[in-house]
């Protein structure tokens, strides 16, 4: 799913700075899982989007794309970014350490470290009151080549979301020449992943 969801943001947020405000903080403070988050608000009102990268430490495209978003200048709406959600898995280059973060939501504030991390991400999502929540991942293959793979897809959890992503995909794909690189839609629900829990 390389970099797929960045394009949604291009459609909704400006890229030129005026009076942007930036807030930041950390999740899981003073633990090995401590990781930053950023809240960037443009001068004009608009939608709020939460972007989470690095749920899986062995998918660099996801967290590298999210880190790039930190640098974007926001003119309209609010962008909340957690670039390196599971920073210990990223350091180690592994999918899960010790648990798969994409299966732990909404987490548990009194649970183990992974459950507390999920809970703090979930609290940030709720507090942000987002119009859209995106998690960025990487796939080992193109969906167009192999329907089991996620590469170049908007993957979502519920079929009723199809019309939204159809509109987004049409705009995004208009700027992508190679057919193989155009975005497809893929309904693949993962209960306990962040986006599933958001919509549920
Ligand atoms: Zn992933």
Image (cartoon, rainbow, N blue to C red):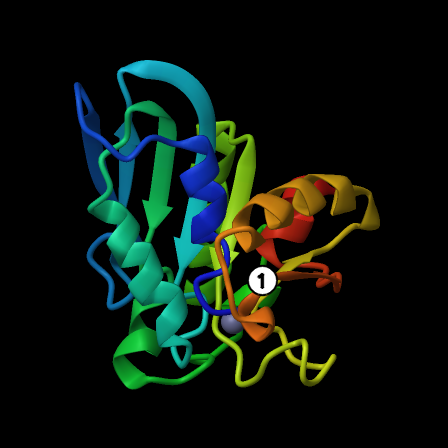
* Viewer-closest of 9 and 181: 181
Where is residue 144? Give x, y as percent. Answer: 68, 77
* Lateral position of residue 71 relative to residue 9, left or right: left
* Viewer-closest of 71 and 146: 146
* Viewer-closest of 84 and 61: 61
* Lateral position of residue 58 relative to residue 111, left or right: left
Secondary structure of residue under mark 1? loop
Check disc 1: other Cα within 10 Å, few if <14, some if 14-19, many if 20+: many
Residue at 17%, 19% in the rendered image: 19
Q: Quadrant of residue 173?
A: bottom right
Residue lying furthest front in this view? Answer: 177
* Lateral position of residue 60 relative to residue 103, left or right: left
Where is residue 195? Give x, y as percent. Answer: 61, 50
**Residue 114 in the image: above or below residue 51:** below
Q: Quadrant of residue 87?
A: bottom left
Asked if ligand 1 lies within 8 A of label 1, the reply is no
* Viewer-closest of 127 and 62: 62
Judge whether residue 51 can be spotted in this image.
yes
Residue at 60%, 70% in the rendered image: 179
The residue at which mark 1 appears reads as: 104
**Residue 103 in the image: above or below residue 81:** below
Where is residue 189? Give x, y as percent. Answer: 75, 61
Where is residue 108? Give x, y as percent. Answer: 54, 53
The C terminus appears in which quarter of the rendering?
A: top right
Residue at 69%, 39% in the rendered image: 164
Judge whether residue 107 can be spotted in this image.
no
Residue at 21%, 32% in the rendered image: 23
């Amino acid at each position: 799913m390389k970099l797929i969801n960045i394009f949604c943001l291009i459609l909704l947020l400006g890229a030129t700075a005026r009076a942007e405000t930036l807030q930041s903080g950390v999740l899981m403070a003073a633990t090995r899982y401590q990781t930053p988050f950023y809240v960037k608000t443009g001068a004009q009102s608009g939608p709020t989007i939460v972007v989470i990268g690095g749920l899986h430490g062995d998918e660099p495209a996801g967290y590298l794309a999210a880190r790039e978003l930190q640098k974007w200048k926001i003119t309209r709406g609010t962008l909340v970014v957690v670039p390196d959600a599971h920073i210990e898995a990223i350091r180690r280059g592994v999918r899960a350490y010790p648990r798969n973060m994409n299966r732990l939501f909404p987490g548990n504030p009194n649970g183990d470290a992974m459950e507390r991390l999920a809970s703090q991400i979930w609290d940030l999502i709720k507090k942000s009151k987002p119009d859209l929540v995106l998690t960025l991942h990487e796939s080992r293959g193109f969906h167009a080549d192999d329907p089991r793979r996620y590469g170049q897809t908007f993957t979502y959890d519920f079929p009723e979301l199809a019309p939204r992503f159809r509109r987004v995909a049409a705009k995004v794909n208009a700027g992508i020449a190679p057919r193989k690189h155009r975005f497809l839609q893929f309904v693949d629900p993962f209960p306990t992943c962040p986006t599933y829990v958001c919509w549920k």
